Image (cartoon, rainbow, N blue to C red):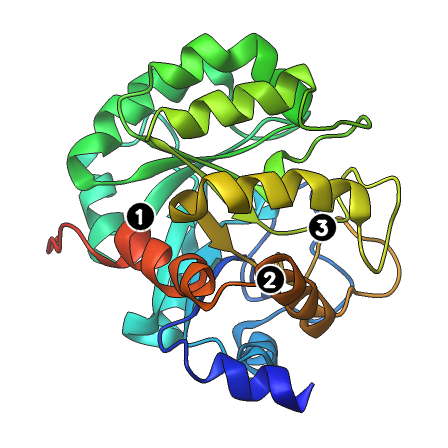
Amino acid sequence: MTALVEQMKQFLGACDCHMHVYDDRFTTMADKHPPERQAQAKDYQFIRERLGLSRVVVVQSTAYGTDNRCTLDAMKQWGERARGVACVDPQDSDEHLLQLHAAGMRAQRYVMFAGRPLSWDSMSLMASRIKPLGWNINLQLSGEALVEKESLLKTLACDLVIDHIGRFTAPVNNDSPGVKVLHRLLDSGKCWVKLSAPYHGSKSGAPDYADIGVLAHELIKRWPERLLFATNWPHPSVKGSMPDDFEWLNLFWHWVQSSETRQKILVDNPQKLYFDGLSLTA
């Protein structure tokens, strides 16, 4: 553990590109509940320091729907070290998008599971609206659905960021149809993938998540300039004990052997995607 902590010190600006905050000062949607475990900004501070991370991307939880106040509050607490992924109602104005941009939002979130606030129908239009701001579409779905949605995703006006190594639910390998679509999207030069939450869809399980590791190794070998590291803290869909974020960082270290590649994934890629670009005032 000590050795890894020391090694992390060389990666100044290392970023957690996907975590959530839940705060009971803000009301969740009627049918949604935050995790039982504490997940306020102050609780995450320990995780950030333990892992040696400098920066963070706060992702709007589906529990809050299109009310982004909780996410914005956490971002404000961390200042310039934080950026955010919003969930914006497609009916909201361009002025509202500008206000969110000025506050540090850099993406529009789509979670394509039952009961989530946005649908596929609005994605292309929203991509066109957010492109001038330099935002991306942040997409979470069952990876198998990539086969059906490939044409749509390839024609989006803005970049696309896919969560959790694709979040495939069935046993897959690098020749599976959905994984091949993910590869083609990465080849387009407009797609990024988060190395995060390997427990989603893994049939081999902890601690090595060897089946998901097969997918991750291929991505790391072929598209290191398109990958992002993330914790998915506080792991809201995991029941029972919370996964150990330090163990996940250790597994990431095992997957990514090259210091140059670690620099890309931890620092350079999030810098380009979230921290560079337009600096607008509302």
Residue 4 appears anywhere in the view? yes
The residue to which callout 3 is attached is 33
Q: What is the secondary structure assignment of the residue under circle 1? A: strand
Label 2 CA crowd tier, 10 Å (few <14, some 14–19, many 20+)? many
Disc number for residue 31: none
Count of numbered badges drawn on the protein: 3
The residue to which callout 2 is attached is 22
Mark 3 / mark 2, whichever is N-terminal? 2
Hey, what amino acid is under mark 3? His
Hey, what amino acid is under mark 2? Tyr
Give the left or right position of residue 213, taking residue 50 as reference.
right
Q: Could you tell me how far apart the alpha carbons at marks 3 and 2 are, in whole angstroms?
A: 9 Å
Hey, what amino acid is under mark 1? Arg
Disc number for residue 106: 1
Residue 274 spot, x, y in % from top left: 31, 53
Discs 2, 1 touching: Cβ within 8 Å: no
